[in-house]
Image (cartoon, rainbow, N blue to C red):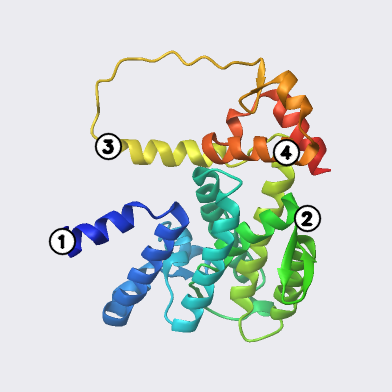
Amino acid sequence: MTSLSQDIKDKLSNLNVLEKIIGVNVFVFIIGLILKPILVWFELPSGFSDAIVKPWSIITYAFLHYDFLHMLFNMLWLYFIGRMFLNLFSPKMALNIYFLGAISGGLLFVFCYSLFPDIFGGRSYLVGASAAVRALLIFLCAYMPNQELRFFTFNLKLWYVGVAIVILDVFGLFGMNTGGNLAHIGGALLGYFYAKQLLIGKDIGKGFERFMDLVTNTFKPSKNTPLKTVHKNKGKVGGYTKSDFNQFNNQKKIDVILDKISKSGYESLTAEEKEFLFKAGK
């Protein structure tokens, strides 16, 4: 019989990357109940001069929640969006969009408050994962706008959801949470641009991904492993021979290619597979 600690360890090891981010957010929220004065060092200040001396805050702010409902709704959104996203795309792409969304939201917040202080008010601070979550949501809405979601007794296309969310955020600029809604819009812009570029075969997150790999590899112990030669069979599409693949209907072809993306990432696709997915996306 395994111990409780081993059971917890096993469950944590089986979480996907976005569920692990949820776990980190919950952990930081609990820490904040005890050590809130320390966590202020990880908030993103609105002033450019203040933000430049706390460069880490452009990411760390997205892991801070001081209000339980704020944290709860962000994490619920992230959980359901994450399940849909990771059925189609790789975990690394999910992290790229999540962190780039947080950065984009933070930058828009700082720039607007610094360049237009008379409009947006005085000194403020940004916390919360909303911008990062918005980026993932709007990415899905822009990448597959005609995908339908069941909403009570009727279906909604994803692009309807995306437009409604953005409209609410724009109206929110005139409310009590101006800074938060600026960050939401920044995250939404990143998600939209990422999706549109991916549809034409450009993964704009690759540079950020390489940077993060460099950072993580710096802290990993080096291992002497033999070099491997990897051969891509360009005569196949989605793992099937071209003759077999051509016999599938369009939906089956899309499912095969999306399954390959979920296992190996978008960059594993051949030029033919990317071209087919691009045409299908139209």
Q: Amino acid at mark 4?
A: Lys
Mark 1 is surrounded, within 10 Å at the Cα level, by few (under 14), some (14 to 19) or many (20 or more) other residues, namely few
Looking at the image, residue 241 lies above or below residue 163? above
Q: Amino acid at mark 1?
A: Ser
Check disc 2 and report its element: helix, strand or loop: loop
| Front of the two marks 1 and 2 | 1
Q: Nearer the N terminus, badge 1 or badge 4?
A: 1
Query: Which residue carries the number 4 mark?
Result: 252
- Say which residue appears at 59% left-offset and 74% top-offset: 180
Question: Label for residue 145?
Answer: 2
Query: Which residue carries the number 1 mark?
Result: 3
Mark 4 is surrounded, within 10 Å at the Cα level, by few (under 14), some (14 to 19) or many (20 or more) other residues, namely few
Q: Nearer the N terminus, badge 4 or badge 2?
A: 2
Question: Label for residue 185?
Answer: none
Check disc 1 and report its element: helix, strand or loop: loop
Where is residue 196? Give x, y as percent: 74, 46
Check disc 4 and report its element: helix, strand or loop: helix
Where is residue 52? Give x, y as percent: 46, 59
Question: Label for residue 220?
Answer: 3
